Image (cartoon, rainbow, N blue to C red):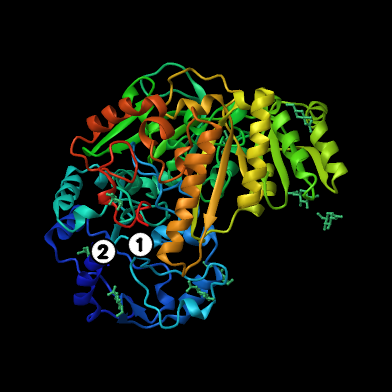
Amino acid sequence: MNSCGILFVSLLITTVVAASSTPILDISPPQWRALNSSVGGRLHAATPFALPCFSKYNNISVSVNEAECNAIQANYTSSEFRVERFSANMNVRLPCTPGVMCIADSTQVQYETCMSTHSGCLLDSANPRNPLAIDGTSCNQGEISPFYVRELSHESLINIHAFEALRSMSEWPVISRRRLSSLRAPEFLFLLKTQATIIWDGLVELIRWTHNLQTMSYHSQFVPELCTSSHRAITVGAGVTFEQVYKFADDNDSMFVGGYAQTIGASGGWMMGGGHSVLAPSFGLGVDRVLEIKIVTPDGKLRTANACQNADLFWALRGGGGGTFWGSHRIHAPRRETINMTFTPTDTNLQEYFEVLVNNSAHWGEEGWGGHVNHAPAGLIYVNPRLSLAEAEASMAQLSAFAHANNGTADIETLPSWFTFFTRFIVQVEAPVGVPTVLGSRLIPKALFESDAGRAQLVAHLLKQTAEFGLPYIPVGTPIAFNYTPGATSVTPAWRTALWHLTGKANWAYNSSTADIRTALSTIHNFAHVELTALAPDSGAYMNEADVYESNHELDTYWGTNYERLLAIKTKYDPHGLLDCWRCVGWKGAAQFPCYPNLSVA
Ligand SMILES: *[C@@H]1O[C@H](CO)[C@@H](O)[C@H](O)[C@H]1NC(C)=O
Ligand SMILES: *[C@@H]1O[C@H](CO)[C@@H](O)[C@H](O)[C@H]1NC(C)=O
Ligand SMILES: *[C@@H]1O[C@H](CO)[C@@H](O)[C@H](O)[C@H]1NC(C)=O
Ligand SMILES: *[C@@H]1O[C@H](CO)[C@@H](O)[C@H](O)[C@H]1NC(C)=O
Ligand SMILES: *[C@@H]1O[C@H](CO)[C@@H](O)[C@H](O)[C@H]1NC(C)=O
Ligand SMILES: *[C@@H]1O[C@H](CO)[C@@H](O)[C@H](O)[C@H]1NC(C)=O
Ligand SMILES: *[C@@H]1O[C@H](CO)[C@@H](O)[C@H](O)[C@H]1NC(C)=O
Ligand SMILES: *[C@@H]1O[C@H](CO)[C@@H](O)[C@H](O)[C@H]1NC(C)=O
Ligand SMILES: CC(=O)N[C@H]1CO[C@H](CO)[C@@H](O)[C@@H]1O
């Protein structure tokens, strides 16, 4: 067992004795007491999400709470249930993106466990009532942070003492191996997570769920502070989810460029890591829509970042990764044509299907289509804010003909609003969460779709990927038809010339062995780093959904030519190096993250 577990055990033994059904961690180390007092006594102990189901916690007997366990089992894969709970993670790596300098990789469910030692507290996501996951098993803390802070007002965040307390804690030998980070759960503002990550997002998210940050405001003429030009905009706190902001925008006859899930925070890690959207082909990425960000930096200062002040920070926050708290975003109110196409895949029609996709994708992108190529049911759902119905039908003619010839459907229609699209096509198909999953991906350049040789290479790749992993899931949401000013954001420049964000993933079970977990991680690493890189060697990846073991992560894959400038800005605003996370700008190395399996070990 590594040092991760040892900390918990030694802290726990003193406390369980005094505790009732939920053991409370000992807070006697003076650094924790100092932090608690600097945050007004709002420091809380965290226990694993599924603990109420277990009769042992870190090998010590505890009482099962049947009622709570029932609710957890019933809602184990629900994003809305999990988003409310501090120690429950999701599938995607988005919302918890830490800091200017971090990628978010701590929100998938496996980060509730320590992967390298397989210590954790998971139920069977395929059957949450499976007694075999519970009986005779000890629920262990895994990588869940022992403490978090909640309900902290933003005034108390801008308090240098909290930062000093945090800094002194990172000197504490045991803590120094853990990173402090945060999550997106509504009631929990700031948490100290061991999960692979850092403080920056903690500091930022500290504010995320305070009262005033859950509000949204509409501005018919928003002028960023110290600037002169005005824009129609909505200001949202990082605690506001897409579902809330889409509804709000709709009430104001507008459309917000955002992501494809209900519970992702609208101003958090989704945006800071790039922010892809089915609307991005026409309107740009999340980072392209932001007008102003207010953020607390690790020196305890509240800063306003926009094109006219703290412009370096503004640039870094739009692509460097991180959580934020207020963002003001430009909005639009266009039309939306949609196509919902399905077909029945067979051994004989798959090649033609991929050819139809690949041969048409360049003009689809130029025309503003974005969406998702789906694996189940096989087909795609695209939306277009620019074309008329007749133009949409003409644009999709070859795909519709293919669908009709292959026992499929191709419904093209005009929807009254973006919110209608969201509720009809996104909410009901949202993926279940709570399954241990690892993603790998790469941005696929438009140039590849524009030559016969490139198209043949892509089709061959898609057939091979299908044989290996099943039909691919392809988010089509790059800013290909958006008029971008080069250098305006810090996302990898590869976004600007790419058409597809090609992904692959591997799942494992609650009780998979460490060797099986390592195999899954290696398979995806090989897929992204070898196979996809061969297809698109000069491209990059969407850091929020990229391979976590990407070895060229700094200069090539995540940030391209922007890395060195990001590092300089990170150093400027975080001179003490308070923030660290796995493969982030300026990270301190793998030794800080013992729960990531070392893939080089046989
Ligand atoms: C933090 O301080 C408050 C107020 O003294 C106390 O109620 C709370 O239990 C402390 N937190 C922890 C984790 O001990
Ligand atoms: C729990 O007990 C098992 C078996 O005795 C041991 O291998 C493991 O290290 C213990 N875990 C903790 C967290 O103490
Ligand atoms: C969880 O699941 C149960 C049973 O399906 C349901 O009644 C309940 O509303 C769900 N949500 C919560 C927050 O318990
Ligand atoms: C046609 O599609 C339907 C629904 O997608 C499916 O149930 C059926 O098996 C398909 N038929 C053939 C011949 O593939
Ligand atoms: C898309 O089309 C398929 C086939 O007609 C249908 O089963 C499915 O419900 C449609 N999806 C939506 C969200 O309307
Ligand atoms: C796709 O384009 C290639 C040329 O790059 C052509 O050979 C092939 O027939 C086209 N496929 C379809 C289904 O139109
Ligand atoms: C995992 O648990 C299932 C039952 O839930 C069992 O069938 C399987 O053999 C177990 N796998 C391992 C690797 O222990
Ligand atoms: C991973 O394992 C390899 C081979 O044993 C070793 O050389 C390397 O230092 C290890 N990496 C870390 C971060 O421990
Ligand atoms: C200007 C305007 O129409 N504002 C509306 C935006 O939506 C909110 C939420 O429904 C309304 O309260 C505002 O009146």
Position above or below: 93 against 443: below
Amino acid under disc 2: Asn
- Which residue occupies the extreme front position in the image? 602
Cα–Cα span, label 1 and label 2: 9 Å
Sequence-first tag of 1 and 2: 2
Neighbor class of circle 2 (other Cα within 10 Å; few <14, some 14-19, many 20+) is: few
Instruction: For the residues labelled 1 and 2, say whether their Cβ atoms are less than 8 Å apart.
Output: yes
Q: On the picture, is 500 further left or further right than 11?
A: right
The residue nearer to you, when weighing 222 against 147, is: 147
Q: Residue at x 50, y 30 (%)?
A: 537
Q: Nearer the viewer, mark 1 or mark 2?
A: 2
Amino acid under disc 1: Cys
Position above or below: 383 against 111: above
Q: Position of residue 96 (x, y in %)?
A: 40, 48
Give the residue number, with chain letter if any, for mark 2. Answer: 2
Give the residue number, with chain letter if any, for mark 1. Answer: 114
Q: On the picture, is 440 further left or further right than 307?
A: right
Position above or below: 72 against 437: below
- Which residue occupies the extreme right position in the image? 405
Q: Position of residue 5 (x, y in %)?
A: 27, 66
Q: Position of residue 440 (x, y in %)?
A: 50, 45
- Which residue occupies the extreme left position in the image? 30
Asked if residue 359 can be seen in this view, the reply is yes
**Quadrant location, the C terminus:** bottom left
Q: Residue at x 36, y 19 (%)?
A: 308
Dot 1: element: loop
Q: Position of residue 515 (x, y in %)?
A: 42, 63
Dot 2: element: loop
